Amino acid sequence: MAAAAVIAALALLAILGPWLSPYSYDALDWQHLAAAPGLTAAHWLGTDPLGRDLYVRTLYGLRLSLLIGVLASAVSVGIGVAWGTIAGYVGGRTDSWMMRTVDVLYALPYLFVVIILATVFGRGRVAMLLVAIGAVGWLTMARVVRGQTLSLKRREFIEAARATGLGTRAILLRHIVPNLAGTVAVYATLTIPELITYESFLSFLGLGVQEPQASLGSLINDGARQMLTAPWMLLAPAGILFALLLCFNLLGDGLRDALDPATH
């Protein structure tokens, strides 16, 4: 619950926080270049070498990283649940073909796929990031859902549903998917920090968000270059990213314990 409260506070801060500053994320203050925190009341977290306010840029970066992480997680959950339930319930050659496809996608070099997508869609576009992250984000979800579906389809209530004449689609939507809700919720919560890490990694390498926009990964990249002369440029986004990933993982662990029948 504490982790959920921190996540909610960070999300609220990312939405409303920039309004508390008179500066936009790309505004230049030529009077305060690379100013440290506390040197001026106008810039609470200091500025970068171009005079841009780090408080506003960090919150904008948090907003963008959260948006990409949540949207990519929703896409991966949708694809993974659909793929895994169909493969696990239908079985046979369909299951074998679908899971071999997952194995092939796992074997593809991730950065190579991202570079191709960046060439096709244009580097830095949010749509490209969602496609690139979603290309691998659903694979683990599909395997987890398939395993749970294989277990559920042998249960008595599924046999009873078949005996009443329900079709495959109705059984999947009415009985299989609702019984996967707990498992999917836990893995979706744990997927969000993983996808945020992917986005931050791509932005750190320069394949993600481009200037003047910022994400936590691109801000950490900028801070790492100025670490010796302006350490506050690294500490602010790195601290926010660390807190965000830690809280999402703690929330996922808490949900897993709460929804696991073996713990009750």
Image (cartoon, rainbow, N blue to C red):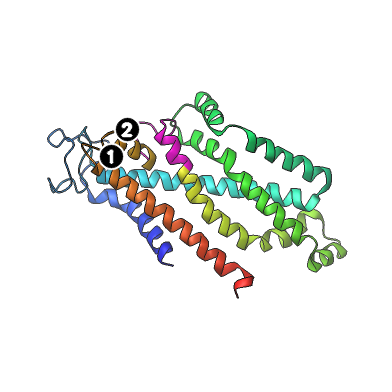
Residue 92 versus residue 10 in the image, above or below: above
Residue type at mark 1 is Tyr
Task: Tell me what residue is drawn at x 74 percent, y 49 percent.
Answer: 86
| Tag 1 and tag 2, C-beta contact below 8 Å | yes
Q: Quadrant of residue 247?
A: bottom left
Q: Mark 1 highlights which residue?
A: 25
Q: Secondary structure at mark 2?
A: loop
Residue 208 point in image, percent of width and height: 43, 34
Residue that badge 2 annotates: 212
Quadrant assignment for the N terminus: bottom left
Q: State the image quarter where residue 60 is shown.
A: top left
Q: Residue at x 20, y 45 (%)?
A: 22
Quarter of the picture holding the C terminus:
bottom right
Q: Quadrant of residue 65?
A: top left
205 in the magenta segment: yes
* Range shown magenta: 198-215
Q: What residue do we see at 28% from left, 48% from top?
A: 18
Distance from the alpha carbon under mark 1 to that under mark 2: 8 Å
187 with respect to 144 (left or right): left
Element type where label 1 sits in the image? loop
Give, as a three-letter code, the residue at label 2: Pro
Residue 190 spot, x, y in % from top left = 52, 54
Count of numbered tags: 2
Please indicate whether residue 29 sits to the left or right of residue 254 in the image.
left
Which one is in front, 76 or 262?
A: 262
